[in-house]
Amino acid sequence: MSSDIDLNDLKRRMNGALENLKSEFVGLRTGRASVNLMDPVMVDAYGSKMPLNQVATVSTPESRMISVQVWDKSMVASAEKAVRNAGLGLNPVVDGQTLRIPIPELNEERRAELTKVAGKYAEQTRIAIRNVRRDGMETIKRLEKDSEISQDEQKVYSDRIQKLTDEMIKEVDHLTEAKDKEIMQV
């Protein structure tokens, strides 16, 4: 069998998509303050978009409060706007160079909205995993066409790649189900 087909590389790339999903899920709030909640917030700073944690210190002084200490006074308004427009349903209060962001209780409507967002993240991850599968399948088809591997070897690799893909999709479904339960808990 040819060494051009690196199943470990495909697995690594699929695991990367899973890790990205896990970090996205950490950012979905469940009623508790978490510095990771601010991870998706991108601030217009110095002519480009930057993550909030690159222009400020984010902390959780209380269980229902996030504090954002902006380093550059000129960035405070931009940081406030970024938090408001991030789609997190949060309203920061400006206090000098600090944004105080109270975390409201989740109502049923917001919980349902968050489960939809979790589903969207999960679908993006499934697509990323399928794209990795497609790349692997194209590679083995090309190798078979170029007579570098036999049709039997192509079938074996194809089955292995599909099995790996199915395992990863199952893991995405498991993570999504767990996150939905966490969000819907009262």
Image: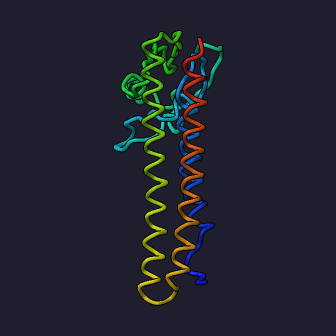
How far from the left and from the top, in percent, is residue 68? 54, 24
The residue closer to the viewer here, 134 or 73, is: 134
Identify the residue at the far bottom of this view: 147
- The coloring applied to the image is rainbow
Q: Residue at x 47, y 11 (%)?
A: 108
Q: Residue at x 51, y 12 (%)?
A: 106
10 displayed left or right of 132? right
105 displayed left or right of 78? right
The residue closer to the viewer here, 23 or 10, is: 10
Please determine whether, in this image, residue 18 is positioned above or below residue 156: above
Identify the residue at the far left of this view: 47
How far from the left and from the top, in percent, is residue 39? 52, 34
Q: Residue at x 51, y 28 (%)?
A: 70
Please determine whether, in this image, residue 10 is positioned above or below residue 100: below
Q: Residue at x 57, y 73 (%)?
A: 156
- Counting every numbered tag in the picture gives 0
Q: Pick the quarter of the image with the N terminus.
A: bottom right
The residue closer to the viewer here, 72 or 4, is: 4
User: Where on the picture, by quarter, is residue 32?
Assistant: top right
User: Where on the picture, by quarter, is residue 48?
Assistant: top left
